[in-house]
Image (cartoon, grey):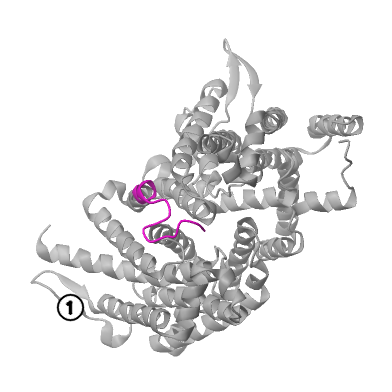
């Protein structure tokens, strides 16, 4: 990283840390929601941007982790963060491993359809059975907390604390993905995306590489889903549905697929846009749909390509 | 399960499979010829059902709904291809997924504005309202039998056009090798537009004919989209015969799954898909590369 870039990153992080001190609670909660979906979009981008695999089932991993929190939380006292969070992430990872193992046997458009179908399988599993309230969903009465010897260290009921915890996990996700994509693993994954046949002939275990990326990505989507469920205090089958996956894809494409942090920008844009449109018109989905169509037709490379066009990348970067 | 119950379930499976075939054949043709994955396909199934409800309400005639709905869908298909889909040819799958997702949001909201978000039911035509007696206690609704006959006729027409006519020859050639067909000077823009509009029309047609036996509700398009994706994955993309096999397979898996394993009914079709993926990742009749 160049010095200028490093300074900008530090400034942005500092701004993000002090943000809840300077805005009303509503905006702290809104920013938390943006960060949560930002984690989901960054996770999805590991397979979409770096792996070249358009997954349509990340909503299912997101929702599954939320359901794990709802099912494992005690009714009248806060769930233990150190126990339920790893459990939720592990469940999402296990689901991703299983679905990925089957779906990665296919390519291209088959992969899109198969992941969509398996994701919906989880949706119908929670929708059609009585697990956690069936199609009505279920409440999570109290937000999780981190306690040690009876003393509460982190109480997520406080909006600011919740925000900082989510911010910490977003930064951790960002760093993890940054390291992964620059490690030999990430390079090999990108090589398989650019030319599968050549990468295979060089001896890369492509199926295993992709399955690993898909599982990590599913686990991180679960991380986001856990905090989303904790924040809303409610889980319903819609959380697992494919509209969730599609909107995360919109964030990835809007932000741009080449940078690790780019989907986070996409999340800010999409959430900001939805917030604004909801205030303007009752039929905000119509406007949102038209904007998505316009963006796909006008900017094939996302916002990133717009930035690249305005500020050409220097070769010494 | 005695023979008569089995016969009823068999008929249910066939009827469900035939409706699935109408939707999935449109989807597989659009992908096979145009190379475009259209997530909004299910939305047209849903819109078809709503238009059938609305026209039946206004005119009192289900056949007016059938004719009107088909014509509206075909024209809408022509217009959409010209406005949006045309620009997706040759673009990556991700752009196609996003544009058609945007289209779903728009179509869903248009449905909301025009017809509201209530659940409706549509009356079957008067002369088809009775039922057909199988045994002393079991009978089968005439309208469901009529759906079977009607869908079979449509399926026969689709196969006739694809196998025996000049346009069908072009469609088969396009599915086999898109670039070569273009290089041979086939007017692909016209063929594309007709295929897209026909695909949309088939989805809407399926929505219209099932309106009297299922409720008309906003989420019906999503459910049908997923099912037809499963059918297309099973049969192999671009293959209409594959879609027919896949649709009947899913029709039976769903119907008998609900009777034999009620607990696992909602996931039975996905298990069938998982097995086929392990056996043939490119579908039963699919080509190796897409």
| Residue B249 appears left or right of A54 | left
| Residue B270 appears left or right of A206 | left
Image x and y of residue A43, in percent = 63, 38
Q: Magenta segment range?
A: B275-290
Image x and y of residue A243, in percent = 56, 54
In this rendering, is residue A95 above or below B119?
above
In this rendering, is residue B240 above or below A85?
below
Q: Residue at x 69, y 66 (%)?
A: A290
Q: Is residue A187 visible?
A: yes
| Image-quadrant location for residue B215 | bottom left
| Image-quadrant location for residue A201 | top right
Question: Is residue B190 rendered magenta in the image?
Answer: no
Q: Residue at x 52, y 47 (%)?
A: A57
Q: Nearer the viewer, residue A178 or B214?
A: A178
- As drawn, the residue found furthest toward the left would be B136
Q: Which residue is labeled 1 in the image?
A: B132
């Amino acid at each position: 990283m160049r010095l200028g870039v490093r300074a900008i990153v530090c400034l942005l992080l500092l701004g993000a840390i002090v943000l809840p001190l300077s805005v009303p609670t509503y905006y702290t909660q809104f920013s938390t929601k943006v960060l949560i979906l930002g984690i989901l979009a960054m996770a999805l981008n590991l397979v979409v941007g770096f792996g070249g695999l358009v997954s349509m089932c990340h909503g299912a991993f997101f929702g599954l982790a939320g359901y794990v929190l709802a099912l494992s939380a005690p009714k009248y006292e806060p769930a233990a963060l150190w126990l339920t969070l790893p459990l939720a992430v592990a469940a999402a990872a296990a689901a991703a491993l299983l679905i990925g193992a089957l779906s990665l046997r296919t390519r291209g458009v088959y992969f899109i359809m198969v992941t969509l179908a398996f994701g919906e399988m989880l949706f119908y599993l929670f929708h059609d059975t009585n697990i956690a309230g069936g199609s009505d969903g279920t409440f999570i009465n109290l937000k999780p907390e981190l306690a040690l010897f009876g003393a509460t260290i982190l109480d997520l009921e406080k909006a600011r604390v919740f925000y900082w915890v989510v911010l910490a996990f977003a930064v951790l996700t960002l760093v993890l993905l940054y390291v992964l994509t620059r490690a030999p693993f990430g390079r090999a994954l990108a090589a398989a995306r650019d030319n599968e046949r050549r990468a295979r002939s060089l001896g890369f275990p492509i199926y295993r590489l992709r399955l690993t990326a898909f599982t990590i990505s599913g686990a991180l989507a679960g991380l986001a889903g856990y905090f989303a469920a904790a924040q809303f205090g409610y889980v319903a089958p819609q959380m697992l549905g494919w509209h969730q996956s599609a909107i995360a894809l919109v964030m990835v494409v809007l932000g741009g697929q080449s940078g690790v942090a780019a989907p986070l920008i996409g999340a800010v844009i999409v959430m900001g846009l939805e917030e604004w449109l909801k205030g303007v018109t009752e039929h905000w989905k119509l406007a949102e749909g038209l904007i998505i169509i316009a963006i796909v037709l006008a900017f094939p490379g996302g916002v990133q390509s717009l930035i690249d066009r305005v500020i050409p990348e220097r070769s010494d970067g | 399960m005695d023979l008569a119950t089995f016969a009823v379930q068999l008929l249910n499976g066939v009827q469900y499979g035939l409706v699935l075939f109408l939707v999935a054949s449109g989807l597989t043709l659009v992908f096979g010829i145009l190379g475009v994955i259209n997530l909004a396909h299910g939305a047209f199934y849903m819109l078809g059902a709503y238009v059938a409800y609305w026209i039946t309400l206004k005119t009192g005639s289900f056949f007016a709904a059938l004719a009107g709905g088909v014509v509206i869908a075909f024209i809408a298909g022509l217009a959409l291809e010209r406005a949006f889909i045309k620009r997706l040819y040759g673009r990556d799958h991700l752009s196609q997924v996003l544009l058609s997702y945007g289209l779903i949001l728009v179509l869903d909201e248009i449905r909301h504005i025009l017809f509201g978000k209530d659940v409706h039911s549509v009356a079957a035509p008067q002369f088809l309202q009775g039922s057909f007696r199988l045994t002393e206690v079991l009978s089968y609704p005439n309208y469901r039998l009529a759906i079977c006959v009607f869908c079979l006729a449509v399926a026969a027409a689709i196969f006739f056009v694809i196998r025996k006519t000049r346009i069908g020859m072009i469609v088969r050639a396009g599915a086999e090798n898109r670039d070569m067909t273009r290089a041979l000077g086939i007017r692909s823009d016209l063929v594309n537009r007709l295929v897209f509009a026909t695909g949309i029309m088939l989805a809407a047609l399926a929505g219209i004919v099932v309106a009297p036996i299922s409720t008309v509700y906003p989420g019906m398009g999503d459910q049908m989209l997923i099912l037809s994706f499963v059918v297309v994955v099973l049969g192999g993309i671009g293959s209409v015969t594959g879609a027919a096999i896949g649709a009947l397979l899913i029709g039976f898996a769903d119907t008998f799954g609900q009777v034999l394993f009620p607990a696992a009914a909602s996931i039975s079709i996905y298990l069938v898909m998982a097995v086929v993926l392990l056996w043939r990742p490119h579908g039963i009749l699919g080509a190796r590369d897409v």
